[in-house]
Image (tube, coloured by chain):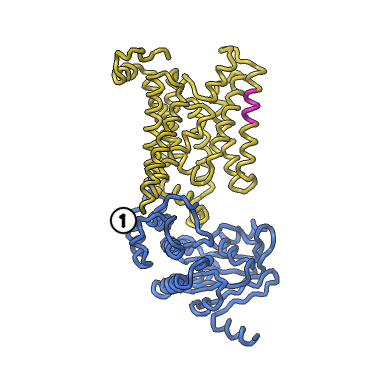
Amino acid sequence: MSLTLNSAGEISVFEALKKYLEYDFVRNALLVGLLISLCAGLLGVMLVLKRYSMIGDGLSHVAFGAMAVAAVAGLAPMTVALPITVLAAILLLWANEKGIIKGDAAIAILSAGAMAIGYLLLNIFPSSDTGSISGDVCSALFGSTSMMTLSESDVWLCVVLSAVVILFFLLCYNRIFAVTFDSDFARASGIRTSAYNLIISIISGVVIVLAMKLVGALLISALIIFPALTSMRLFRNFRAVVISSAVVAVIGSGVGLLLSLIYSFPTGATVVAVHLIIFMVCAAIGAATYKKE
Amino acid sequence: MSFFGRLKNSNGGAQLAENVIISARGVSLSYEGKTVASDLNFEVCDGDYLCVVGENGSGKSTLLKAIIGLKGVNSGELFVSDKARRAGLGYLPQTTPGESDFPASVREIVLSGCLNRIGNKPFFGKAERAAADDIMARLDILQLADKPFSQLSGGQCQRVLLARAYCAAGAAILLDEPVSGLDPEATQEMYRLISELNREDGKTVVMVSHDTDTALKYASKILYVGGTAGDNFFGTTEEYISVKNSLD
């Protein structure tokens, strides 16, 4: 974006912000960015506690590969990436639950494989619309200015999917706790744990594909796990961690988005850097607080 | 094979006597593909305190998992009455659940035992909160209610899990080695509390243990699981003692 604060700093940061917020595309980017972050933050609590953090990372690479396939085939990225990533999520979580794959190694193969195939395809069949391989790849990997060029249907898709995810977490909160804490006990209590795992897989796939727009494939896992890890430093009960994770996700991404807007920093990297700083500050606060006990 | 086992498991409740909660006829079980117990025959009635004893690896834990529906049986018929299924079975697992950094307060864990009481409702009501507080008070962990689970001692952890199982146990509590890893004092306290829930509340208890002496002290019925040979025993505690004495 070319709208940057002039170097002399004649207008204050707040005035600049006010000016930016008058634009529809900026408000849309903020709305979508915050909703995606909120969903990622909620999802992250479950993934971190079930030791699935790396799965998020692996899935984001699959999403990258799928986007590359879509670009080469000339299809809309979302229509290809969404089903493929959701399918990969279901397979990965299912295989993990059944003990078919021993976590990290299989995920490493999947991530690197999907990444390599994606990059290979983009090189062999360069996209005709942009003509620039490096530009495409860079924005898919690290997030891009596409946040600022969201179409109305993009915005609606994000709003609806986010609403579904948030509603699921709200209404199923107690069951999610039971399944995450002790899935055997939950099953004995008549909860269909496999249905919950399936829903979590689908949500993981959806959130990751949506978050690619915001921070890019390489940085998605940060968006998912940082708020949860930050909150676990501060709180020791599930409810507080879930609420805090949602709040931290929104604040971190909000600040990151605004900073990247005002100073023309790359969006994804700025958002993740802000989350990292919040994590470090909270880790220090947590260490100091719990040392006293 | 396990398919048929499960099929019978869910359909057989009707033939049972009114007060029978769990009934096994010629049940054999396998663990990781190997048969560990065979030809098990026993019945658990309302108010019983059944202790399941036997060597390590004889399939005692697998039996509990089969009863609560986490595993199928190899062959034979394992019935859990429909009434008991609806009322709920409370389970205390052998290994402490949750990773060491899992953020969960004692109250959150005990309340999760009330999930089978709320049907399709999303949230817990006053009744469930009161029930959770009540059992926490009786097990002397109410003062720990807001403490993180990860900071409790072994004995406190087991009492929290017992409280959770109690909340879920409309019909029966199933305990898998509830005193493993506890010091002697905490062990005695745990046995006393379990026995109290059985005698005072009339809760049916099924407990897996390898501590036969204590089993004989508290249990009303004994199931000895004799491994793959099917060399099992089932009867009242008195019968078990007299059979054992005649063998010695």
Q: Position of residue B53 (x, y in %)?
A: 58, 73
Q: Quadrant of the C terminus of chain B?
A: bottom right
Q: Residue placed at 50% from the left, 72% from the top?
A: B45
Q: Which chain is yellow?
A: A
Q: Nearer the viewer, residue B112 or A290?
A: A290
Query: Which residue is labeled 1 in the image?
Result: B126
Give residue A185's position: percent from left, percent from top: 49, 56
Magenta stretch, main secondary structure class: helix
- Residue B145 is drawn in which quadrant? bottom left
Rendered position, B222 above or below A207: below
Residue at horizontal 49 percent and vertical 74 percent from the top: B49
Highlighted magenta segment, given as a residue range = A113-119
- Magenta region includes residue A108: no
In front of the other: B92 or B156: B156
Please give the name of the residue rendered at 51% of the width and 37% of the height, measured from the top-left corner: A204
In the rendered structure, which amino acid carries the disc numbered 1?
Lys
Q: Is residue B9 above or below residue A221?
A: below
What count of labels does the image hold? Answer: 1
Q: Nearer the viewer, residue B158 or B33?
A: B158
How many residues crowd mark 1 within 10 Å: few (<14), some (14–19), many (20+)? Answer: few
Q: Numbered disc 1: what chain? A: B
